[in-house]
Image (cartoon, grey):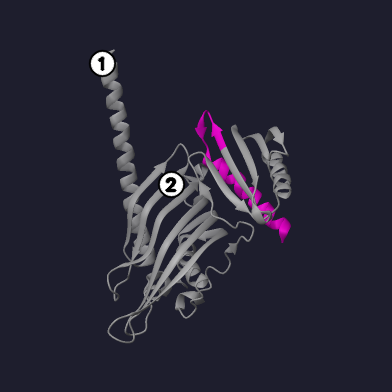
Amino acid sequence: MKKFIIALGIVVILLACITIFKNLIIKSVVTTAASRIIGAPVHIDSFSLNILSSTIHISGFKMYNPSGFPEGIMLSCPTIKVIYDRGALLQQKSHFLIVEIALKEMQLSKNKAGKLNVDSLKIVQQSKSTSSIPMQIDLLTLNIGKIVYKDCMIGTEPSMQVYDVDRHKTYKGILTAQELALLVLIEPMKSAAIKNADICRIDLVKRVAMLPVAVAETFIGKDSVQQTIDASFERVYEISLQEIKHIGKIIQDNPLGGVMKADINGATVVLMLRKEIDNKTKITISARKYMLPQLDIAAWVLYQIIDTVQDTLQ
């Protein structure tokens, strides 16, 4: 018995070490790739990939100013949450079902020559390049905090303006890493009505569709996804029922309570709706298989419902 406990302890320690080193290696690869694509130093405090739940958690993402500008943070994202498609792991093109980015602050700086730090990035200068890194993001939620704008052109001390944006935007159909990076850089500036930058004239991200029905941030929990939709409770329930019947088998259906349970790809999926103010509806979806969370399935179901709601309202 004692030998078994010792052996079990060694196995647990080995598994923990493998997990730690796996995350450290991936973290290094991600920061190197992001720095190369963007053309500015990128730092990540922590990176965690959970294969069982198909989730990625990134904490403390920071992008620094490019050369030619004072040292400092240009973009700060405290949290980035991702649900990926496990079925696409062995493919060359990465497939992310849901990406949720919390952008706390963006610092724009204009130097003495009148050049903005964002326009000096490699990704902006090479925006027309045919070279791109393929990927697919079904649903992207961007929560924008504030923009700090520093102008060093006049005087010894820079003038400063602060824009409290505080907006949540949702998009679908992102197909390259370049589109993702440019979208995260451009959208805060558009929200603050800053249009006098070269980056704002890039056509690359104009084909990315913004979803008007998704009005609040996606919440990715340990075993569920959540989104607030700009549609009535009854309409969302009707569409959810149709979509789930199409892709799975209904086990339980409670229209008045806004709850349904279904079997989808061998997982037990539970959908719950709640009425919000202004005729909005909060939808929460969880999925489990063999007692383990299946967030990739939950995210896929959520995307199907949101996409159908949008189509019916257009």
Badge count:
2
Q: Earlier in the sequence, mark 2 or mark 1?
A: 1
Q: Secondary structure at mark 2?
A: strand
Disc marking residue 3: 1
Q: Was residue 63 drawn as part of the magenta stretch in this picture?
A: no
Amino acid type shown at disc 2: Ile
Considering every residue shown, the one lying at the far front of the view is: 277
Q: Nearer the viewer, residue 192 or 8?
A: 192
Residue in view at x 35 percent, y 60 percent: 62
Which dot marks residue 56? 2
Q: Which residues are magenta?
A: 287-314
- Which kind of residue does numbered mark 1 sit on? Lys
Type of secondary structure dominating the magenta stretch? helix
Q: Residues within 10 Å of mark 1 (few under 14, many from 20)?
A: few
Q: Is residue 276 visible?
A: yes
Q: Confirm or deny contact between disc 2 and disc 1 (CB under 8 A).
A: no
Q: Position of residue 250 (x, y in %)?
A: 69, 34
- 240 relative position to 156: left or right: right
Q: Quadrant of the C terminus?
A: bottom right
Image quadrant occupied by the N terminus: top left
For the residue carrying disc 2, how many other residues have a C-alpha within 10 Å: few (<14), some (14-19), or many (20+)?
some
